Image (cartoon, helix red, strand yellow):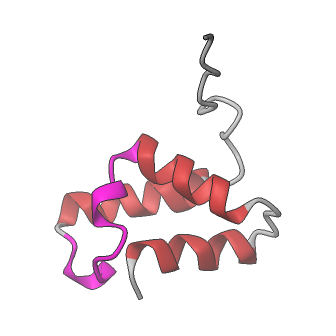
Amino acid sequence: MTTREHLEFYARAKGISTIEQNVNLVMARTGIKSYENRLAYKLSGGNKRKLSLAIALLGRLTFFFRVPKRVH
């Protein structure tokens, strides 16, 4: 499974209703967005830890990770 697939799987398992939004936000904030299509078993040790952190944060701390709205 890819990094994104792992996150989507765990988001479903946790019952998160806004899966796409949560996955994108957590990937961006943990720094694994560029690895979203890479197979998880091929990630470096550090990026595997980031993936584990992202899974733990899914649906829990999105309040702290909110992207500020742009003021035009």
Q: Identify the residue at horizontal 50%, vertical 77% (top origin).
A: 6
Residue 70 location, x and y as percent?
Answer: 60, 18
Q: Identify the residue at horizontal 28%, vertical 58% (top origin).
A: 34
Residue 58 against residue 38 in the figure, above or below:
above
Q: Nearer the viewer, residue 59 or 37?
A: 37
Q: Nearer the viewer, residue 48 or 39?
A: 39
Q: Identify the residue at horizontal 65%, vertical 54% (top origin).
A: 21
Residue 26 location, x and y as percent?
Answer: 52, 50
Which of the 4 image quarters holds residue 29? top left
Q: Which of 40 and 52 is in front in this view?
A: 40
Residue 30 location, x and y as percent?
Answer: 40, 46
Residue stretch in magenta: 30-43
Which of the 4 image quarters holds residue 7? bottom right
Residue 28 location, x and y as percent?
Answer: 43, 46
Residue 62 against residue 12 in the figure, above or below:
above
Q: Quadrant of the N terminus?
A: bottom left
Furthest residue toward front: 72
Which of the 4 image quarters holds residue 16? bottom right
Furthest residue toward bottom: 1
Residue 2 falls within the magenta-colored stretch: no
Q: Identify the residue at horizontal 82%, vertical 63% (top origin).
A: 17
Left or right, residue 15 beside residue 58: right
